[in-house]
Image (spheres, rainbow, N blue to C red):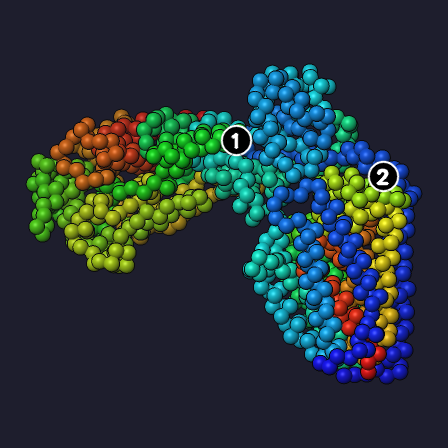
Amino acid sequence: MKFDRRLVSNFDWFLLLITIIIATIGIFNIYSATFAGKEPGGMPIYLKQVCWIVVGIFVMFLSFCVDYRLLERFAYPLFTVAVLLLILVIPFGKSVSGSRRWLELGGFSLQPSEFFKIAIIFILSKYFSKYPGYSLGAIRGLFIPFLMLALPVVLVLLQPDLGTALIIILIFLSLLLFNGIKMKNILIMSSVFLAGLPLFWHYLKSYQKMRILTFVNPDLDPLGSGYHIIQSKIAIGSGAFWGKGFLKGTQSQLLFLPEQHTDFVFSVFAEEWGFLGSLMVVSLYLLVVLWGLRIASHSREGFCAFLTFGIVSMFFWQIFINIGMSLGIIPVVGVPLPLMSYGGSSTISFLLGIGILINISTRRFLF
Amino acid sequence: MLLYDKDNKREFKKKLFFSIVFAIVAFTIILSRLWYLQILQGKKFKSLSENNRIRIVKIPAPRGIIFDRKGKALVDNYPSFDLSIIPEDVNDLESTIKKLSDLLNVTADLFKAKLKESRGNPPFKPIKVKTNLDYREVAILETNKLDLPGVTIEIAPKRLYIFDKLAAHLIGYTGKISESQLKTRVSDGYSMVDLIGKYGIEHDYETVLRGSNGGAQVEVDAVGRKVRVLRELEPTPGENIFLTIELDIQKLAEKALADMIGTVIVMDPNTGDILALASSPSFNPNMFSLGISSKEWECLVSNPNNPLANKAIQGQYPPGSVYKIITAIAGLEEKVITPETVFYCDGSYRFGRRAYRCWQRKGHGRVNLHRALVESCDVYFYQVGQRLGVDRIAYYSSLFGLGKPTGISRTNEKHGLIPTSLWKLEALKSPWQESETLSMAIGQGFVLVTPLQILNLISSMANGGILYRPQIVKKITSPGGDIIKEFFPEKMKKIPVSDNSINLIKDALWGVVNERLGTGWRARIEGADVAGKTGTAQVVGLPKDSSNEYVPFEHRDHAWFSAFAPKDKSKVAIVVLLEHGGHGGNKAAQIARDILKGSLKILNDDNSSF
């Protein structure tokens, strides 16, 4: 590829800057979250996160180098590989506390469901950009996208990973609405969903029913998620305006919080940096979302608009659900907070997403 | 690639505008919630966090109780007082440990070791440092509790095996969940400190007995004492199990077996219910529930007599002469002999270039089937075996369930081995020798059985040819006593053998015990019509004239005796196996007699009381 100087002059430095700020805050916060109760030996978790971010930035750069008009070609292969990986997890996955989510690859654990989020955004963008909302008038036209959704969601639920399945469904619905859908179809879909619920419920095992009931009402599980929510609220609330300071959060340093470097990472941050810090991080996230929507609105091609919108919706839902859960306004569900939660697969796929946004944002001036 | 047209683009812009509004609203919700928690409620949460006193207390579910068939408890729970330390609530760990060790007269190292094990736990989590405090210790700690902040006494149900070693192999034991078990069962709600059934009924019926743990969110004061319960989840006790075991008969069996090595099983031949099962040497399951030391464990596993093995289902022995029942039935059914067929026994049988001896060196003279069984003549059965061939004997063995597990338990029941010519070709890569058929016909050579398989064989004689699946669980009831599941006799099959053959054998078995020269005369009980068969299984080839006293213990023969009584309308069947117990007609027959006599009395008393 011939180097185009405009790639530099039009480069979306702003998005890159925000991303790096958030990721840096994330590393410091993971350092604090794992400061107490760390196990001796092995690489500290915050350093591992640094490695993941370095790998992620490399992937981001790669995704930036590809001409965005070529990205569309990746849709089908990407989707196929992602689904295959999800299938492989079922028999070969590594089981951690009762769920199989990871594939062991020579010392690394890969979480295919994280990458699948990007894959489904690609394939839906391609499909919807070919068939805009008005052409999908008949319910038949929605059949294929639903097929793309159903198998992977079932596979993810089998792991079981309720949080990721929920995110995938939300991304799907966001793109569906963005493409436009007739009111009639919305009604049909929701009535099919409601009619199917009792049947679905009937086939669940009692422990599965319990899991869903506690998801809706944590009070049913006063020893598990009910307890976690209380401790998370105490952590965030006690941060007050100024926060307790770095490494000084009693809730996190005394390990009252569950999963404090992954799902409840925001509580650690809010305790130590207070309302001021939280306001800053939430604003940075809002900036990413709004900036992303701006990129979508400037996109010249349907595929890119969908792709951008899909990636933005992925960020939005994960941010909203994760923080909402920590704040006790949404039931407990394990979803990583973009670039703040520890995790290789999620960090890399978020940075990949950002890379694609920068790519589209930069290149729209070229043609 | 589809470029969008103007309309489409306008449509997109509209949707994007809505998305922006939606995102801003969502983030505003988050920010106002943050405002509420951190600014409006900040003070409250700050004081809550400075003095975070909300703890999770686990309330373990009591495990189901195990009863005998009449409802006498064999395994129960009792409250154990456990000493825990909550590091966060302790002012000075060193001095607290010192105080504790002075008060309880225990070395401080023990506590330190336990604390060390639990490093990395959150400091508010109680660490159990001593279990099963006695009342004196509890009293001492209670009076000194103001000096011991952060030290708590928790009450947890512990497993109590009321009769210690009694039926230990059947009941099994519970122990701390192992790391590998935890990995696979964490989704069933097990945690690191949980107990899990590891052996016997405790293992096989783990899901039934376990119940589900409860817990509570409690607020504690500055020294870790409970102030109030915020929310509580009641534990659900496990379900109770009624075994088919009859406690008094089991006691009888254990007593009769005493310190010999072997096993005794008693069964109701009309249902397959196991009334008693003892295996010796045994172990005390209470050792495991209190936490077994590695030294005690070492001692159990290194014992050459293998106290942890249930010899009734895991011991495999040559059946010896008991197997002649099979050879006899096969001979009759295949019509290679009739009851009147007579062979002459002069003390040995010449086959090829070798003389195959009868245990009776003087010889039995002219014997028919009845006499051959009564006096256990080897020479007679050599010739029956020779006429049948290996595969026909094997076929009749399998009809009676030999060579495969009976299905009594999920824990490692052994198959035994019934050789066939094909088996030998595949396993040993050499063709079957006819001389091996001779050994097989008298239950030696390759043949291996478990004592329970022999009991099944003798039971099917007692009940006229029906093979029942041996049962050890009679019913499962809820903690309240309602029947959840009841186990009924399971007929595996009616053995396709003529009643005539079975009756002939039954008469002969009666003769073994009650006729002159019968090898099982020591099992005779006046008025009870015992019928049975002795067996002596060679461990190593011994010269037949060597008397057992001069043979090293581990080379002595295994002794079998298997019987039922009364001969008609049998009430009880028994098998006795003594490792290195010498001739089956001696000690084994005596033991069987004592147990049969006691059992018949117990069963008759039960009947008359109805």
* Residue B172 can be seen, yes or no: yes
Residue situated in front as seen by the camera: A271 or B313: A271
How packed mark 2 is, by other alpha carbons closer than 10 Å (few <14, some 14-19, many 20 or more), is: many
Which chain hosts label 2?
B
- Residue B273: x and y, percent? 42, 39
Q: Residue at x 17, y 46 (%)?
A: B381
Quadrant where the image shows the N terminus of chain A = bottom right
> What residue did someone put label 1 on?
B291
Residue situated in front as seen by the camera: A40 or A268: A40
Q: From the viewer's perspective, is residue B198 above or below residue B548?
A: below
Label 1 secondary element: loop
- Residue A30: x and y, percent? 73, 50
Judge from the rendering whether residue A289 lies leftward or rightward of residue B156; answer left or right.
right
Q: Quadrant of residue B534?
A: top left
Amino acid residing under circle 1 = Gly
> What residue did someone put label 2 on?
B45
Residue situated in front as seen by the camera: B46 or A6: A6
- Residue A321: x and y, percent? 79, 56
Judge from the rendering whether residue B269 lies leftward or rightward of residue A206; answer left or right.
left
* Residue B209 can be seen, yes or no: no
How packed mark 1 is, by other alpha carbons closer than 10 Å (few <14, some 14-19, many 20 or more), is: few
Which chain hosts label 1?
B
User: How many angstroms separate mark 2 from mark 1 (CA)?
Assistant: 42 Å
Judge from the rendering whether residue B605 lies leftward or rightward of residue B73; answer left or right.
left
Proximity of marks 2 and 1: CB atoms separated by less than 8 Å: no
Q: Residue at x 61, y 56 (%)?
A: A100
Quadrant where the image shows the C terminus of chain A = bottom right
Could you tell me how many numbered marks the image carries? 2
